[in-house]
Image (cartoon, grey):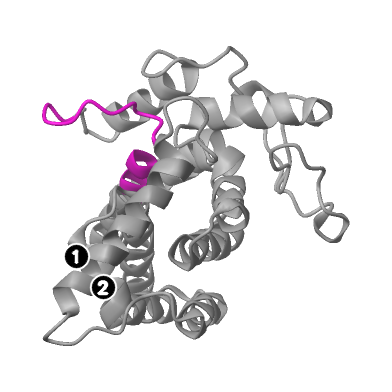
Amino acid sequence: MDRLEAVRMSALADAYSLLAVMLDRPTFVLAEGLASGSLLRDAQSIAEEAGLGSAWASAVDVFLVSGEAPQTNAIDGDEALSAYLHQLRIEHTRLFEHPVSPAVPLFEGQFLYKVKQDNPSAGDAPTRRARFGAKEEPEFAGRARAVRKEDFFDERPRLFVNDAALDAERCYRKAGLKRSADKNIPADSMITELQFIAHLHAETARALLGKNLREIEAWEFLIEEFNRIHLRKWAYDFFYAIEKETRLEAYRLLGALGVALFDARL
């Protein structure tokens, strides 16, 4: 049983890591993985081992039907991939990196503040699908997981110095991690949070294989704490916003994968 659960925890770690890779600034490797299908095959394998059902497979099928990624060959492959990479980077900038008004803020503090500003009736604990300027859709009413009001951060966010970022750093230090000296990224970046929750699941898998009950309980506690204080409040809505706001199927795929994962996990 421990070995099966370790495989599932390891697969979940891979799932979070895959989302982080797709969410980061697009690279030639990402464009090639989408075009060749290698990234899509990885997603389907991860879903099977993690017990995510058919949701990820369905999202992959929709992307394949779209035909957005170029069908390359040895002659024009690099040129076609470069053009596709250019499209991905333009959309990534519009969605996440626009200097004034990103369509989907990449940082927890900024995202939650925007949701609250666009949905003033949502109060301090916005529910799922409380999208920017939109009310919760009736068919999803009541599906939101319960969160605690005291876990929300109410101050107007600033990059690096806001309650969400500072508490995320606390969680990272508690797990024995510290900020990289090579990258100066706010601690409440969704990319960083995904990498962290992936790390926690990978460590849980390792502890399960070693049958170390104390370590298993410690890592599971950290997972529950980080989900409750951070991811449960914004991860589902973040990926739902990507799915609805994007103009490219690659990012619609990312949104669908994130929605399916966090719907199952939170």
Number of numbered labels in the structure image: 2
Rendered location of residue 64, percent (x, y):
45, 83
Q: Is residue 234 above or below residue 43?
A: above
Rendered location of residue 43, percent (x, y):
37, 74
Classed neighbour count for the residue bearing mark 1: other residues with Cα under 10 Å, few (<14), some (14–19), many (≥20): few
From the viewer's perspective, is 246 left or right of 173? right
Distance, label 2 to label 1, CA atoms, is 6 Å
| Residue 1 or residue 193, whichever sits in front | 193
In the rendered image, the residue lying farthest to the right is: 138
From the viewer's perspective, is 79 left or right of 161? left
Q: Residue at x 38, y 41 (%)?
A: 193
Look at label 2 and name its amino acid: Gly
Label 2: element kind: helix
Q: Is residue 221 visible?
A: no
Rendered location of residue 216, percent (x, y):
34, 52
Residue interval drawn in magenta: 180-197
Q: Are marks 2 and 1 in contact (CB under 8 Å)?
A: yes
Q: Residue at x 49, y 32 (%)?
A: 108
Q: Quadrant of residue 88?
A: bottom left
Q: Residue at x 77, y 31 (%)?
A: 119
Q: Is residue 85 visible?
A: yes
Question: Can residue 155 be found in the magenta stretch?
Answer: no
Q: Quadrant of residue 150?
A: top right
Look at label 1 and name its amino acid: Val
Q: Is residue 248 above or below residue 236?
A: below
Classed neighbour count for the residue bearing mark 2: other residues with Cα under 10 Å, few (<14), some (14–19), many (≥20): some
Q: Which residue is mark 1?
A: 29
From the viewer's perspective, is 154 left or right of 188? right
Q: Which residue is mark 2?
A: 33
| Residue 121 or residue 193, whichever sits in front | 121
Question: Can residue 190 be found in the magenta stretch?
Answer: yes
